[in-house]
Image (cartoon, rainbow, N blue to C red):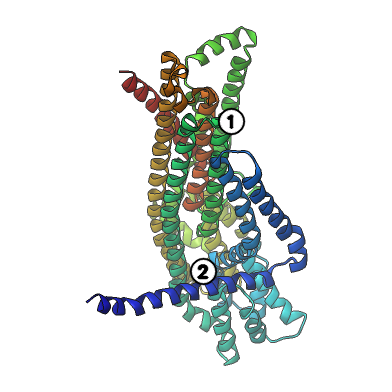
């Protein structure tokens, strides 16, 4: 019977091993291929990056073996060197991945913009020239300029240029699109016919890429949870073991904390790379709206108040001036975590202001597809200008967007240039999508496009993006819950371990165990409790910084949203630390 089971399981295990080997070969092949795509020469990269990281790795191995340090300090030294070596080896792969993400993140906007321009009365090569001037598209704008350069400088046909670049781009999605476009143009199909027929396929692929990125974030969230729990366990060991081994507790804890910081930094950069690029806010430097000014005022005021608190605590630490001496007395009675949490609290105010305005931006995004579709249909039906259509259309209720529509009509009615009128309209909505799609609609109208077709095209594309944003919001809420929970549980574990050690040290001192045989098992003198408590509180502070940045990357909202999450995370960690210390001390003392 067992032989039958072994024979049945054998092929399955072989298939699994074969699949793993194939994945490993593909990964190694992609890494080697990324070295060929780097802007830096391989020889120069080896001299500047690979050899120094290899030297540091060898140095870390020698240090981990030869230095007279505790094992818990040697392991982080070795892992730090290994991490630097892997970073040097895999950086080209990460660079190519970042370029691929840059090409795919805004591909749907570029194809939509390309479709809008193709429906106008300009030459098809001029369509690509116009699109290549849009610097906001980043890597995609660079790629489009390479296509036009092949046409203008090297006298290649457009389909040949598209086919050549399709083989060289690191993005499979963009390569497939360019290859299909080249084939259709070579077969005699017009550019607008191909792009209009490509819209549904493009949206489906964008949805697949977007949902795939969200799925990868879910995997990274689970991996991050397991790694942080492992590092928390390592820090607890670094806190507790020195009382049994007699090693330097401060050095051991500091070494594990450095490794903890590098692990969090690594996850932050990975999540930053994996997060889909879909900003919510449209921000410009030459025109500050009322919402922008309110956020700036709240931010400057919060920073000034936080710096004031830090200055007062500094006076208290030094004991300077009568105010400093009074503060010093208060600080002696206040737990260290609260002394760090209180000065950062004002930073929550700009986050709350930005969150309030961000809800308005989301509401305006919801209303915009209906507005632009109605505007395009009305212009086509009445054969009238945008100003004439808005005169009656602004009477319709478009919810949070009604005020901006009315101001757009007023500017057009006052003979303000359409470019400037739409520019102010986009700026006042503070929406990135509204800005991009309004620009597409305006350019399409000015170049002779059909308003109804433009409105329907833009409306359908924006509705799909809004659906994906709802999924992203759900993923963000889940991530927030995980990060808040990890912060509370980690702080509890850190300080419960510290409290146990502190009680054991006090117990050893009170009973004078050093004169007994039991004293050989407890080394209370290796601990500097206030310094260790300060280091553990710094972990909470650093965790709050990186976790809030992760939330902001996944959320795609305003930058000041990170301040609100930072304050909440710091208070969760510090509050959990203070509560744990007081409860554990009370229970154990009883």
Q: Which of 37 and 138 is in front in this view?
A: 37
Q: Where's the C terminus, which quadrant?
A: top left
Residue situated furthest top in the rendering = 322
The secondary structure type at the circle numbered 2 is: helix
User: For the residue carrying disc 1, how many other residues have a C-alpha within 10 Å: few (<14), some (14-19), or many (20+)?
Assistant: some
Res 415 → quadrant: bottom right
| Cα–Cα span, label 1 and label 2 | 39 Å
Residue situated furthest left in the rendering = 1
Q: Mark 1 points at which residue?
A: 303
With respect to residue 581, does 142 lie above or below?
below
Residue ID at (69%, 50%): 59
| Count of marks overlaid on the render | 2
Q: Name the residue under label 2.
A: 108
**Which numbered dot is residue 413?**
none
Q: Which of 426 and 280 is in front in this view?
A: 280
Q: Where's the N terminus, which quadrant?
A: bottom left
Percent coordinates x, y for residue 175 in the rendering: 57, 78
Task: From the viewer's perspective, tell me whether residue 44 is left or right of residue 406.
Answer: right
User: For the residue carrying disc 2, how many other residues have a C-alpha within 10 Å: few (<14), some (14-19), or many (20+)?
Assistant: some
* Residue 534 in view, yes or no: yes
With respect to residue 327, does 379 lie above or below?
below
Q: Nearer the viewer, residue 59 or 138?
A: 59
Pointer 1 or 2: first along the chain: 2
Task: From the viewer's perspective, tell me whether residue 273 is left or right of residue 205.
Answer: right
Circles 1, 2 touching at the beta carbon (< 8 Å): no
Percent coordinates x, y for residue 577 in the rendering: 42, 29
Residue ID at (58%, 51%): 424
């Amino acid at each position: 019977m067992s032989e039958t089971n072994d024979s049945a399981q054998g092929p399955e295990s072989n298939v699994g091993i074969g699949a793993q080997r194939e994945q490993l070969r593909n990964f190694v092949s992609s890494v080697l291929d990324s070295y060929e795509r780097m802007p830096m020469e391989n020889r120069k990269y080896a001299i500047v990056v690979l050899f120094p990281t290899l030297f540091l790795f060898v140095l870390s191995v020698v240090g981990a073996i030869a230095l007279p340090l505790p094992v818990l300090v040697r392991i982080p030294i070795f892992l730090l060197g290994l991490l630097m070596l892997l970073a040097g080896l895999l950086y080209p792969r990460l660079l190519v991945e970042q370029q691929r993400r840059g090409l795919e993140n805004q591909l749907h906007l570029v194809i939509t913009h390309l479709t809008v321009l193709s429906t106008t009365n300009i030459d098809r090569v001029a369509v690509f020239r116009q699109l290549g001037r849009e610097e906001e598209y980043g890597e995609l704008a660079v790629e489009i300029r390479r296509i036009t350069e092949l046409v203008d400088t090297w006298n290649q046909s457009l389909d040949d240029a598209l086919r050549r670049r399709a083989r060289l781009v690191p993005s499979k999605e963009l390569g497939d699109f360019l290859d299909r476009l080249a084939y259709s143009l070579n077969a005699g199909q017009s550019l607008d016919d191909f792009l209009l027929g490509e819209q549904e396929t493009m949206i489906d692929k964008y949805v697949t890429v977007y949902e795939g990125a969200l799925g990868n974030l879910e995997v990274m969230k689970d991996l991050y949870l397991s790694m942080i729990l492992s590092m928390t366990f390592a820090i607890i060991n670094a806190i507790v073991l020195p009382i049994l081994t007699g090693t330097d507790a401060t050095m051991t804890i500091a070494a594990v904390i450095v490794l903890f910081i590098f692990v969090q930094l690594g996850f932050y950069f990975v999540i930053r790379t994996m997060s889909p690029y879909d900003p919510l806010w449209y921000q410009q430097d030459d025109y500050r709206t009322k919402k922008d000014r309110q956020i700036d005022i709240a931010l400057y005021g919060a920073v000034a108040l936080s710096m004031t608190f830090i200055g007062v605590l500094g006076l208290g630490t030094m004991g300077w001036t009568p105010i400093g001496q009074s503060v010093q007395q208060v600080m002696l009675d206040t737990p260290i975590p609260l002394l760090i949490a209180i000065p950062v609290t004002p930073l929550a105010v700009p986050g709350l202001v930005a969150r309030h305005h961000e809800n308005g931006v989301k509401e305006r995004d919801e209303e915009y597809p209906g507005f632009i579709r109605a505007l395009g249909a009305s212009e086509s039906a009445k054969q009238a200008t945008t100003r004439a259509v808005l005169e009656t259309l602004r009477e319709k209720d478009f919810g949070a967007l009604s005020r901006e529509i009315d101001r757009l009509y007023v500017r057009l009615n006052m003979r303000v240039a359409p470019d400037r009128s739409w520019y102010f309209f986009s700026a006042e909505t503070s929406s990135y999508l509204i800005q991009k799609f309004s620009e597409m609609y305006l350019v399409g109208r000015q170049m002779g496009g059909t308003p109804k077709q433009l409105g329907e095209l833009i409306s359908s594309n924006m509705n799909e993006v809004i659906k994906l944003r709802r999924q992203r919001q759900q993923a963000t809420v889940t991530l927030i819950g995980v990060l808040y929970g990890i912060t509370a549980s980690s702080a509890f574990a850190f300080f419960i371990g510290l409290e146990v050690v502190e009680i054991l040290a006090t117990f050893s001192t009170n009973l004078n165990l050093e004169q007994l045989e039991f004293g050989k098992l407890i080394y209370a003198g290796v601990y500097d409790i206030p310094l260790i408590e300060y280091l553990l509180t710094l972990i909470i502070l650093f965790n709050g910084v990186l976790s809030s940045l992760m939330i902001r990357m996944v959320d795609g909202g305003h930058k000041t949203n990170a301040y609100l999450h930072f304050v909440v995370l710091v208070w969760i960690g510090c509050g959990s630390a203070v509560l744990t210390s007081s409860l554990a001390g009370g229970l154990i003392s009883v």
